[in-house]
Amino acid sequence: MNVRMNLVQWSLVMMPMLSLAQPKRLITSARPNSVQTVSNTTTATERQTKQLESTSTDTTPQSSMDVNTLPLFGERAKTAAQIDEEIHFLNDCDRNFASRPEASEFFAARGWDYIQSGQLDTAAHRFNLAWLLDAKNADAYWGLGVVCYQKENLPDAIRMLKKGLAVTDSNAVLMTDLATLQIKHFQIKAVQDDLLEAEQHLQRSLAISPENAGAYQKLSLVNYLKADYDKAWELFHQAYSLDLSVLDLAYLNDLLAKRPDPTGKFK
C-alpha cells in the first residue's frame, strides 16, 4: 500500500516526540483557497511598501524595525513615528484600493506568497499590515500563526489561530490547523485543556465539513492519546474510507502496537 506521509502528521504522532527535528509547516502553510489576488493595479502600493522598507533600514531604530515582524506589531503602545507611518500607509491604501478590506486581502495574499518563499519576517509584516487595514480579516491572524509556527513559537501560533477563529468561527480548515497545534502542544506540555480543546475543534470541523479526512485522522490521534484505542481505530478507518492520502504510516504502526485492528484490515 503506497501511502503518502504528511510531515506535520508524522511529527505529531511519533512516540516519543522528536524534540529537535521539528518540521515547520502547517497543513495550510500556503495561501488558502479563499484568498484571491486583487487587480494588478495594486502592485504600485506593494512596490511603495518595499521601497519604504529598503530606505528605512539605516534610519529606523532596531526596536522599531523589529516590531513590524512581531504578531500584531507586538501588541504594544506605538511611538509617534509609528503612528505617523501608519497614517501615511493607510492614506496610500485609500488612494490605491476600492476599500480597506480589499487592501487587507491583498497584503494577506502577499504574506502567503512570502511564507511560500521562506521570507518569514516579510510575511509577518504583510500580515500585520493586513490586520491594520481590517482587524476582521481572519487570514491576517492565520498567516501570523503560521509564521509563528515556522519560527517554532508554538504558544503565539496557537494564540493567533484562536484570534483568527474568533472572527471566522465556521472555517473548518482553520479549526483543523488550530487543533493540530494544540495536539502538538499537548505532547510537549501535557496540558489536558489542549487535548480537550483540540477534540472540540475537530468535532466542530467535522460538523461543518463531514468529508474532511484529515480531521478524522487527527481526531483518531486525540483518542489514541486518551488511550481509547477502539475509538481511535474507528476514526482511523473513517479517514481511510474518505482519503487514503491522509493516512500516516508512523501513526498506524503506533496504533497497531497498542491494539490490533479490530477489522483485520491493517496488520
Image: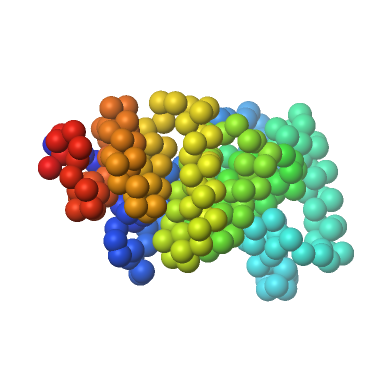
User: Residue placed at 37% from the left, 33% from the top?
Assistant: 213
Above or below, 74 against 26 in this view is below
Q: Residue at x 35, y 47 (%)?
A: 228
The x, y position of residue 193, in whole percent, is 54, 56
In this picture, is 144 found above or below 101? Answer: below
Foreground: 267 or 242?
267
Report the front residue among 10 and 127: 10
The colour scheme used here is: rainbow
Q: Quadrant of the N terminus?
A: top left
Residue 209: x percent and y percent? Answer: 48, 27
**What's the residue at 70%, 72% (across, down)?**
63
Comparing 226 with 148, the one in front is 226
Residue drawn 40% across the image and 48% down it:
222
Quarter of the rendering containing residue 248: top left
**Count of numbered badges drawn on the protein:** 0
Res 62 seen here: yes
What percent of the width, then of the height, locates residue 28? 46, 42
Residue 42: percent from left, percent from top? 67, 35
Q: Can residue 32 be seen in this snapshot?
A: no
Residue 58 relative to residue 86: left or right: left
Q: Which quarter of the rendered picture does the C terminus lie within? A: top left
